[in-house]
Image (cartoon, rainbow, N blue to C red):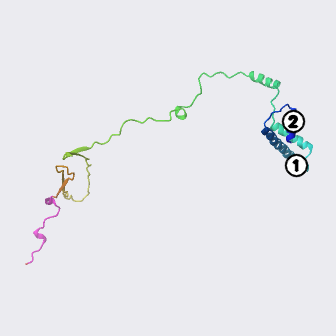
Amino acid sequence: MLKLFMSIMKDMGITDLNPVFINQLLEFTYRYIACILDDARVFATHAKKKVIDLEDVKLAVQMTVDRAFTTPPPRDILLEVARSKNNTPLPLIKPHCGLRLPPDRYCLSSCNFKLRCNKKPQTKQMHHHTMGGEHRPSTIPKPVIKFSSGAPASKAVAKPKIQMTMPPGNNPTPTIKIENDLSSSLKRKREEDDYDILE
């Protein structure tokens, strides 16, 4: 088979060629003949024949040529088709320029980023009290109002007084003093009528 391809190349005037080209020709020939014989077997089976004959091979070759090896039409036919196509007038130019696109929010041509506002969020101001040369922030608590229905009003409970003082010097530990007002306690006084005197 290699000698056959080499003789074909010499008859065509090709003397210098790459040996890889011979292998490509062998592969192409094997694949082409295998496809032709497979198609011929299909045609023979369809015609209910047991053996492939010459007519089946010719039909397979014709089908393969029409499907794979297409040749361009002749020049005269191409000129006739081009002449009939060029006789068709071009459409008129529209008054607007470019393509008419939908609004920007529906297009991908708009900006894909958003600017961030430089305004800082407002925070509540805190009062600063000075104690012993140090600034301590303190917040003002909100008043809490409680309502009671039908119950008699009770006396308010006296809260202990807390006093914090900063001693002079480098000692950072403050002194805390707690005072409790016992005079305003809710404990009622003992009365003489509560107890019977035994004689």
Q: Position of residue 25 (x, y in %)?
A: 81, 39
Q: Which residues are magenta?
A: 181-198
Q: Amino acid at mark 1?
A: Thr
Mark 2 neighbour density, 10 Å: few (under 14) some (14–19) many (20 or more): few
Rounded to the nearest angstrom, the CA distance separating label 1 from label 2 is 35 Å
11 is higher (above) or lower (below) than 150 = above
Q: Which mark is residue 22?
A: none
Please give left or right for residue 188 compared with residue 104 in the image: left
Would you say residue 192 sits in the magenta stretch? yes
The residue indicated by pointer 2 is 8
Would you say residue 155 sits in the magenta stretch? no
123 is higher (above) or lower (below) than 100 = below
In the figure, residue 178 lies in which quadrant? bottom left
- For label 2, the SS is helix
In the figure, residue 13 lies in which quadrant? top right
- Along the line of sight, which residue is nearer the eye, 67 or 33? 33
Q: Amino acid at mark 2?
A: Ile
Q: Which mark is residue 45?
A: 1
| Residue lying at 79% horizontally and 23% vertically, measured from the top left | 79
Please give left or right for residue 68 compared with residue 111 in the image: right
Q: Position of residue 167 (x, y in %)?
A: 17, 51
Q: Main secondary structure of the magenta part?
A: loop
CB-based contact (under 8 Å), mark 1 and mark 2 = no
Please give left or right for residue 12 compared with residue 160 in the image: right
Quadrant showing the N terminus: top right
Label 1 vs 2, first from the N-terminus = 2
- For label 1, the SS is helix
Please give left or right for residue 29 compared with residue 145 in the image: right
